[in-house]
Amino acid sequence: EIRMLAFDKIQKLSFSYFDTTPSGWLMARMTSDARKLSSIISWSIVDLLWGVMSMVGILIISFVIDFRLALILVILIPIFFAISIYCKKKILKEYREVRKINSSITASYNESFMGANTTKTLVLEDSNNTNFNNIINKMRKRSIRASIFSSIYWPTILFLGYIGISVVLGIGADLVVGGKWLGAGITVATLYLFVDYSIKFFDPVMMIARVLTDLQQAQASAERVLQLIDEKPDIEDREDVVEKYGDIYN
């Protein structure tokens, strides 16, 4: 559907748009960007809903078991969100650049195909190869940067999650032996049950962290495709003209 909307818009855009926009940029939006968007969104939304619902359910059960220990999990949630917001900006910035350079690669492919006769006539093979290698190197560097930020984000969430479990174990152990800090104690079985649910709580957190990383890639692609769909032609017929003579298709 997105490709149909984009192709429909291409038919309606004015000459000036094609004078200033390389065909490779359009091809990248219609192919790789649309493909990236569909492959990520198809499962990421399902995983995100599963993660959020699981977190809410486990939190409710945790408060039923022992609200004092459950508060530890609640305190960690804002920290997770703060880290996610920071990393989100970094990851999105890098993936925007990756998709932008990817368009340059597609444009270079297209120009080499369409201008093959000119290349052979003017002996530009070496120059074209050098320019293409430069673009590829930019793509490699940006892709590595994007992968680094994505790779740091997930272990950071994992590390904080197990710090939270360690705090639960420490405070829970104190409650088991007498509850000197937080009042009445709990049994070993209750502590074991709570730790088990705490571990289960961080499973959906890890899932959401991975989905957020994937969605940054999807957003970078979506922005480029929607930019094409939202593009306005320089010349448009008035409503009275369309009513009398029809539009570009009718």
Image: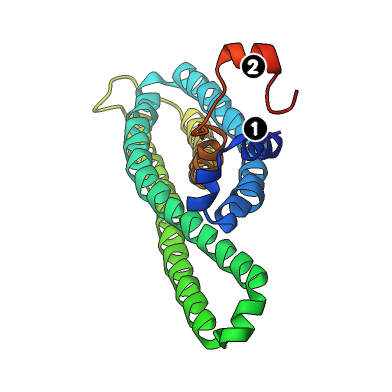
**Which corner quadrant holds the C terminus?**
top right
Q: Which percent across, then down, holds residue 82?
A: 32, 37
Q: Is residue 56 visible in this depiction of the protein?
A: yes
Q: Check disc 1 and report its element: helix, strand or loop.
A: helix
- Left-right relation of 31 to 14: right
Pick whichever, 174 or 139, lies toward us.
139
Q: Which percent across, then down, holds residue 112?
A: 61, 72
| Residue 59 sits above or below residue 147 on the image | above
Question: Which amino acid type corresponds to the residue marked 2 in the rendered image?
Answer: Val
Q: Which mark is residue 242?
A: 2
**Nearer the N terminus, badge 2 or badge 1?**
1
| Residue 155 sits above or below residue 202 on the image | below
Q: In which quarter of the image is residue 144?
A: bottom left
Pick whichever, 163 or 50, lies toward us.
50
Pick whichever, 55 or 14, lies toward us.
14
Colour treatment of the image: rainbow
Q: Check disc 2 and report its element: helix, strand or loop.
A: helix
Report the Cα–Cα distance between label 2 and label 1.
43 Å
Q: Residue 136 carries which label?
A: none
Residue found at x 48% / y 23%: 59
Q: Mark 1 points at which residue?
A: 46
Residue found at x 38% / y 40%: 84
Count of marks, rendered view: 2
Q: Please rate how many residues cluster around mark 2, counting C-alpha atoms within 10 Å: few if below 14, some from 14 to 19, many from 20.
A: few
Q: Quadrant of residue 83?
A: top left
Q: Is residue 221 visible in this depiction of the protein?
A: no
Q: Quadrant of residue 242?
A: top right
Q: Please rate how many residues cluster around mark 1, counting C-alpha atoms within 10 Å: few if below 14, some from 14 to 19, many from 20.
A: few
Question: Which amino acid type corresponds to the residue marked 1 in the rendered image?
Answer: Val
